[in-house]
Amino acid sequence: MTDGRQEDLLAVARELIAEEALRYFTNRRDDLNLPAVPENHAARLAEAAYKVAELRPLGEIYNLVWRATRAAAEAAQKNPRTPRAHMATHAVNRVETDVQRATVDPGWELKPFTAITGQGPAAMTRALFYNVLDSDPIETSLPKLREALPEPVVAPRAADAAPAGEGDELAATVAWLNSRPEAWDPYLVAAGLSVLADVLTDPLNVEATITVRGLRKRYGAKEVFDDLDLDLGPGVTGLLGPNGAGKTTLMRCLATALNPDAGRIDILGNDPSSSAQRTELRKVIGYLPQNPGLYPHFTAASMVDYMAILKEITDRGARKKEVRRVLAEVDLADSAGTKVRRLSGGMRQRLGIAQALIGDPRFLIMDEPTVGLDPEQRMRFRTLTSQLGENRTVLLSTHQTEDIAALCDRVIVFSGGSVKFDGTPRELAVGAKGRVWSSDTRPTKAQIYWRTADGSYRVVGERPSDGSAVDPTVEDGYLQLLGTAARAGS
Ligand code: ADP
């Protein structure tokens, strides 16, 4: 669990406890026939709930709410002529006073309520506490939870990052919640869980391993980028952008294959502008260039072996083993003895990937790795790359938005030498919500459209007169973001 992720989870936990307390307050108010809390006092009530949620477990907070509402009901009985609205305010005042005491006086013992008539923790709360935090929200206070959580680690866990099967799990959770009368609206819960899933997998929560500041690169008078800032952390980051955007140039700078004109790069604590550190870096960086200069007369194995020598794997036995390993990773074990010139385009591409994997690099840079791969090899590549991204930093460029959707934790849209978007693939797709249409007539005004397999037009932009809204994909999000610039140079 990462440090950031842990704090995010605790923040969500606190919010849920406070919301549970507020929900119980409302239930009690209804039961005791107290009036609604006036608008101007509702914020005070919420503030008190959030404050006490920081320190006390939900069972104790239930007790506190129970007392405050009972006191208000008793006061109402005793003074029947007092305006009814005052009764709710009375309850809020009492909650505030008791919360104050509960927070400054840890010795104040509130008997925890374990079972509440007509209310158990809501589905979202149960999902977080039982499934993620492995604790009981009724009994566990936030400080205790903080102590009990495992030590932070740098990389996100595989299970958290794996998108596969997420939909099934969500569907099963929703079905289960649906069968529980006390659960909230299952669709709200589903939406809540997906927010939670984003918190859990948010690659931006992970500490940066590569930082780029003020980077500039020009070819003659042609400026590719100027003053570029970027942070990369563990996980798979996809670089998406039109041809000529500068993706290759950036990747070459990061692979220490090209010197920038200005700016600073820090890779795993090393500065590639120092020649000594550059040499060290090359041992821990794997790079698949756009044209991985392969020698036609070398065999696949000797090609990779040669790269292993360049990476200073000097022990022969270890090198041989490593060559076998990386060839197997890309399904080329049977072609180890085949000359490069006899390999198909897709096989050469895989050989390029194999050489990038030598020495188990901590930072893997791949320029359009899926070009030329058949569907089966592409699936294989996705699996391999997701596994690598579990505890390494992987940066890849691609023109395939499906690759981005299927395997990247994070996507950076690069255009005109600057970052136009930086977030999760889902966030990129959601950016086109309400801007993607299916239409039967050929659009005239819309910026971008194309014909789909079923003969209808898919339109990104203004709604065509007969357009029906469709769910946006990563590609739609990308086209919506860049408009016609998405096609520049291609
Ligand atoms: P991308 O990978 O996004 O397609 P590149 O980094 O390859 O973009 O190219 C960025 C810009 O720099 C393009 O306009 C390209 O023509 C130019 N460029 C790239 N390499 C060179 C070079 N060696 N000499 C001159 N111009 C170059």
Image (spheres, rainbow, N blue to C red):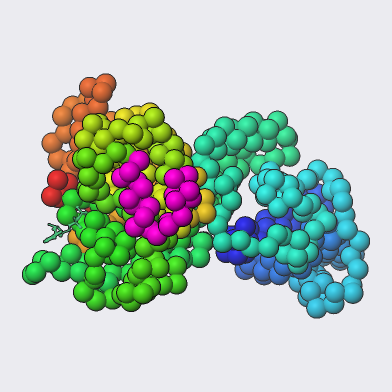
Q: Position of residue 54 (x, y in %)?
A: 72, 67
Magenta stretch: includes residue 136: no
Viewer-nearest residue: 408 or 74: 408
Residue at 57% over, 47% down: 158
Magenta stretch prevailing secondary structure: helix
Looking at the rendered image, the quarter that the N terminus falls into is bottom right
Residue 412 picture quarter: bottom left
Residue at 45% over, 72% down: 269
Q: Position of residue 205 (x, y in %)?
A: 51, 61
Residue 67 picture quarter: bottom right
Q: In the displayed structure, does residue 300 sit left or right of residue 385?
A: left
Q: In the displayed structure, does residue 194 sit left or right of residue 301?
A: right
Residue at 52% over, 50% down: 390
Viewer-nearest residue: 324 or 121: 324
- Quadrant of the rendered image holding ligand 1: bottom left
Q: Position of residue 290 (x, y in %)?
A: 24, 49
Residue at 64% over, 63% down: 152
Residue 143 picture quarter: bottom right
Looking at the rendered image, the quarter that the C terminus falls into is top left
State the residue lying farthest toward the left: 221
Q: Position of residue 46 (x, y in %)?
A: 67, 65
Is residue 1 visible in the rendered image? The answer is yes
Is residue 198 visible in the rendered image? The answer is no
In the image, residue 190 sits, relative to residue 358, either above or below, namely above
State the residue lying farthest toward the top: 454
- The magenta segment is 301-321
